[in-house]
C-alpha cells in the first residue's frame, strides 16, 4: 500500500475539519496535554500525576475524579459541554484538571478520615459547636443523641450531610490554593467553571416549583455561593432557604481560606446544626422512601459507602487518598494576585503564564437582592488573556487529526493485507486453513513506554551494524584496490617478498549498491516462551528494524501463531510494514510474545508472497523460530518437508531465506532449512552476524 505524502497531508486536514469533541477531548494527545501540565504542577512537590480523559455523556456520571495518582476527567460532562466553543471547552477541562490537582496537593485526607471515624464513634471533631442560639442548642442535643444511640438511618443521613458540607468547603479551599499557586491557565479554568455553574443551576424559585427537597435547595445555594460568590435568584426569591445561607456565610468565609483544616471541620459541625431542620426533614423522607419500597437499606448503605469513599456532592467528582497537603503558610483568596509564587517551574510557564487584567472572584458578606435578582453582570470582562490557548488547541487538533488519519490508513492497510492473504494458495498441507491478518491501528502509551525502557541498549547494537555496513557501501560506491589476492591478472611487486602466495591485486570500479528489502517473520508459538526465546526474538526484531529503517532499507516484521482449538485460524500480526505512515511500527514490535500453536508453512508463504511484490534486486526473508512446527494436523516430518519445499520454491523465485536459531534450536533449524541460518541466542553478536549476511549481498 503506497500513500502519497501530499494526499496524506490533505487527508489529515480534511479529518481535522470533521473532528468531534469526543475525538478531540477524549483522545490520547489531549490526555497527554493535561498530563504534561499536571506533572509540571505536581513535580515540585515530588508527586507524579497522570490524566486520562474519557467520554460519558450520562448526566449522572462523574465530572472528574482522582485516586491521588491518576486523574480521570469526563470530557462529556454537562458543565464543559455548556460552553459554545472548543477553546472554552478546553479551558473548562483544564480547570477541572486543576481542581483535581488541588485535591492531590492540598487536601489532608488523613484529617478527613479522622473526622469521619470520630463521627462514626459518636463524637464531633475537632470540637462541638459553641456560641449557639437556644434553638441551635436544642438541635445540637438532638444530633448528639443520634450520635450516641446510633440509629442506622439517622446516622447515614448525618454522615452524608457532613460529607457534603465538608466537600463543598474543601473545594473552595483547594481551588483558592491552586489559583494562588498557579495564577495562569489553571486559575482561568477554575474561575471559568465557577462563573458558569450558577448559570446552569435552576433559580431558587424554579427548584421550589419542581418540588426539590428543601435540603437540596439549601445545599445548591451553598455550592453556588462558594463557587462564584453569588447565587441564581433570578425571580427575586426571599424566604427560609436564603436565610439559612445567610446564616452560614460567616462560617464559610472564616474557614475556606484557613490553612488549618480543623477550621473547616469545625465549621462543618456548626453548619450541620444550623441546617438541622432541613437534614432532619431529609431523614424523614428517607424513612418514608424505605417504607414505600422506593429504596432498600442496602442501596442506602451503598450510597453512603460511595460518599465516604470520596464522592464530592456539587464538586467535580471523586477524590480519595492518604497523603498530607503540600506545605503553605499564607492566607489566600481566589481573586488575590499578591504574593504570587516566584518559583513556578520553566516547563509549566509556557502553558500557564497569563497577562494581568483577569476577572477576579470576590467573597461577599451578603447577597444583593435588588432588581437584578442578585445577579450582577460585568460588561467589561474581556477574557483571561492566555495567549497560547488557541495555539494549544490547534496543536492538539493537528495531532488528533494525524492520529485519526493514520489509524484509518492502517485499517485500510490491514484490509489490503487480508485481501492478499485470501488470494494466496497455501498448498495441500494447509487446505481449509483461514489466515487472519492483525495490525494494531492504535498504539497504546504502555507500549511506547515499554519500548523507551528497553530500546536504548539495543539501539547501540543497531548503530554498530550501521557503521560496518555503511563502510561496505562506501567502498563499493567509491571503488578502490583489492590487494593480497591468491589469483588475479595484475601482479603486485611489493608482495613478492612474502611467502604466502598472495601476490596479485585487482582494481575495483565504482558501482551502485543493489537495492535491498528485508522481511522478518517471528514464530510466536507457546514453546517460544521457554528459555526466553520470545524475549530474544523481540530484542532481535527491535535491532533489525532500527537498523533497516536507519539505512533506508524497506522492512516488514510479522509474527504468527495458530489458534488452539476452534477453527484453527492462522493469525498473522503485522508489526511493521514496508509502506507504513505513522512511524509507530517500532512500538508495535513490543507486542511480540509466545501465544498458541504455529503453522509455519502458511505464515512463511504469506510473507514470501509479500516479498514477491517488491522491486528490490535483493529480498531477504529472515525467520526466527524454535524449529518445532506444531499445529492441528501439521507437525513432524510432514511439516518439515512442507517448509523445505516452500524455501526451495521461493529461492527459485529470487527470495533468499535465512532461519535464525536460538540456543539448542540450531540442529532443528539446520535440519529444516539447511545451512542458511543465523544464531541470535547472544543478542550482542547479532551486529556481526547480520552485518556479514547483508554485506555478502552488497559486495562484489
Image (tube, helix red, strand yellow):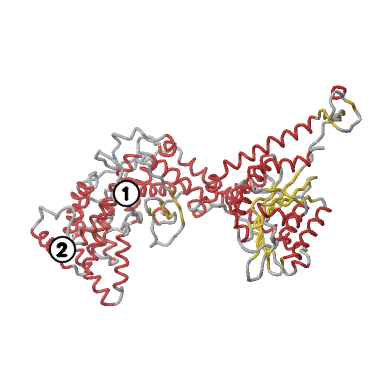
Instruction: Say whether residue 211 is left or right of residue 647.
Output: left
Is the residue 569 above or below the residue 337 in the image?
below
**Would residue 478 be visible to someone looking at this image?**
yes
Assess whether mark 2 and mark 1 are in contact (beta carbons under 8 angstroms): no
Where is residue 598 drawn, in percent x and y? 67, 62
The residue most toward the bottom is 292
Q: Which residue is mark 2?
A: 143
Is the residue 663 above or below the residue 386 in the image?
below
Instruction: Say whether residue 336 is left or right of residue 407.
Output: left
Q: Which residue is mark 1?
A: 323
Where is residue 443 drawn, in percent x and y? 57, 52
- Residue neighbourhood size for the residue with mark 2, other residues' Cα within 10 Å, grouped as few (<14), some (14–19), many (≥20): some
Where is residue 477 drawn, in percent x and y? 78, 32
Frontmost residue, 172 versus 506: 506
Secondary structure of the residue carrying tag 1 is loop
The residue most toward the right is 489
First reached walking from the N terminus: tag 1 or tag 2: 2
Frontmost residue, 471 versus 359: 471
Amino acid at each position: 500500500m503506497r500513500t502519497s505524502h501530499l494526499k496524506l497531508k490533505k487527508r489529515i486536514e480534511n479529518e481535522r475539519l470533521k473532528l468531534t469533541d469526543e475525538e478531540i477531548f477524549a483522545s490520547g494527545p489531549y490526555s497527554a496535554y493535561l498530563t504534561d501540565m499536571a506533572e509540571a504542577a505536581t513535580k515540585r512537590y515530588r508527586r507524579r500525576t497522570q490524566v486520562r480523559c474519557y467520554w460519558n455523556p450520562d448526566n449522572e456520571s462523574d465530572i472528574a475524579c482522582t485516586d491521588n495518582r491518576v486523574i480521570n476527567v469526563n470530557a462529556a460532562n454537562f458543565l464543559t459541554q455548556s460552553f459554545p466553543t472548543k477553546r472554552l471547552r478546553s479551558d473548562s477541562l483544564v480547570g477541572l484538571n486543576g481542581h483535581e490537582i488541588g485535591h492531590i496537593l492540598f487536601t489532608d485526607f488523613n484529617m478527613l478520615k479522622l473526622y469521619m471515624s470520630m463521627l462514626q464513634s459518636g463524637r464531633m471533631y475537632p470540637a462541638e459547636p459553641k456560641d449557639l442560639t437556644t434553638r441551635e442548642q436544642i438541635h445540637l442535643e438532638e444530633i448528639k443523641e443520634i450520635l450516641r444511640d446510633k440509629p442506622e438511618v439517622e446516622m447515614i443521613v448525618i454522615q452524608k450531610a457532613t460529607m457534603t458540607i465538608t466537600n463543598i468547603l474543601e473545594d473552595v479551599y483547594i481551588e483558592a490554593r491552586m489559583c494562588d499557586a498557579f495564577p495562569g491557565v489553571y486559575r482561568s479554568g477554575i474561575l471559568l467553571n465557577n462563573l458558569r455553574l450558577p448559570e446552569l443551576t435552576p433559580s431558587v424559585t424554579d427548584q421550589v416549583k419542581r418540588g426539590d427537597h428543601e435540603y437540596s435547595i439549601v445545599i445548591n445555594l451553598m455550592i453556588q455561593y462558594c463557587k462564584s460568590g453569588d447565587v441564581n435568584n433570578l425571580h427575586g426569591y426571599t424566604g427560609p432557604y436564603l436565610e439559612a445561607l445567610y446564616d452560614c456565610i460567616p462560617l464559610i468565609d472564616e474557614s475556606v481560606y484557613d490553612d488549618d483544616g480543623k477550621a473547616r471541620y469545625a465549621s462543618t459541625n456548626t453548619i450541620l446544626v444550623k441546617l438541622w431542620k432541613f437534614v432532619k426533614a431529609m431523614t424523614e423522607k428517607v424513612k418514608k422512601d424505605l417504607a414505600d419500597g422506593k429504596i432498600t437499606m442496602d442501596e442506602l448503605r451503598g450510597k453512603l459507602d460511595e460518599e465516604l469513599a470520596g464522592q464530592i456532592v456539587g464538586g467535580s467528582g471523586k477524590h480519595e487518598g492518604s497523603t498530607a497537603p503540600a506545605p503553605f503558610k499564607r492566607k489566600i483568596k481566589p481573586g488575590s494576585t499578591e504574593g504570587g509564587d516566584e518559583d513556578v517551574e520553566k516547563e509549566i510557564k509556557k502553558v500557564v503564564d497569563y497577562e494581568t487584567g483577569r476577572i477576579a472572584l470576590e467573597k461577599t458578606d451578603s447577597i444583593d437582592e435588588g432588581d437584578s435578582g442578585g445577579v450582577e453582570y460585568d460588561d467589561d470582562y474581556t477574557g483571561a488573556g492566555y495567549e497560547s490557548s488557541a495555539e494549544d488547541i490547534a496543536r492538539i487538533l493537528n495531532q488528533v487529526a494525524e492520529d485519526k488519519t493514520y489509524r484509518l490508513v492502517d485499517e485500510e492497510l490491514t484490509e489490503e493485507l487480508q485481501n492478499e492473504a485470501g488470494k494466496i494458495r497455501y498448498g495441500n498441507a494447509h487446505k481449509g486453513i483461514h489466515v487472519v491478518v492483525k495490525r494494531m491501528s492504535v498504539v497504546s502509551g504502555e507500549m511506547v513506554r515499554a519500548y523507551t525502557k528497553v530500546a536504548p541498549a539495543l539501539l547501540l547494537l543497531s548503530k554498530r551494524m550501521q557503521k560496518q555496513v555503511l563502510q561496505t557501501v562506501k567502498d563499493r560506491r567509491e571503488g578502490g584496490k583489492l590487494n593480497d589476492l591468491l589469483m588475479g591478472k595484475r601482479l603486485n611487486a611489493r608482495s613478492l617478498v612474502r611467502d604466502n602466495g598472495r601476490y596479485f591485486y585487482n582494481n575495483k570500479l565504482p558501482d551502485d549498491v543493489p537495492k535491498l528489502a528485508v522481511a522478518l517473520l517471528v514464530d510466536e508459538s507457546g514453546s517460544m516462551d521457554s528459555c526466553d526465546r520470545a524475549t530474544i526474538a523481540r530484542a532481535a526484531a527491535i535491532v533489525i528494524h532500527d537498523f533497516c529503517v536507519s539505512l533506508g532499507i524497506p522492512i516488514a516484521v510479522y509474527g504468527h501463531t495458530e489458534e488452539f482449538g476452534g477453527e484453527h485460524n492462522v493469525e498473522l500480526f503485522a508489526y511493521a510494514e514496508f509502506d507504513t505512515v505513522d512511524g509507530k511500527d517500532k512500538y508495535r514490535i513490543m507486542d511480540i510474545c509466545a501465544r498458541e500453536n504455529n503453522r509455519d508453512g502458511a505464515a512463511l508463504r504469506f510473507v514470501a508472497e509479500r516479498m514477491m511484490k517488491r522491486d528490490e534486486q535483493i529480498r531477504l526473508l529472515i525467520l526466527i523460530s524454535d524449529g518445532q512446527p506444531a499445529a492441528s494436523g501439521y507437525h513432524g516430518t510432514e511439516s518439515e518437508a512442507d517448509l523445505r519445499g516452500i524455501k526451495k520454491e521461493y529461492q527459485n523465485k529470487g527470495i533468499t531465506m535465512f532461519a535464525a536459531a536460538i540456543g539448542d534450536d540450531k540442529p532443528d533449524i539446520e535440519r529444516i532449512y539447511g545451512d542458511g541460518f543465523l544464531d541470535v541466542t547472544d543478542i550482542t553478536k547479532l551486529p556481526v552476524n547480520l552485518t556479514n549476511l547483508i554485506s555478502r549481498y552488497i559486495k562484489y
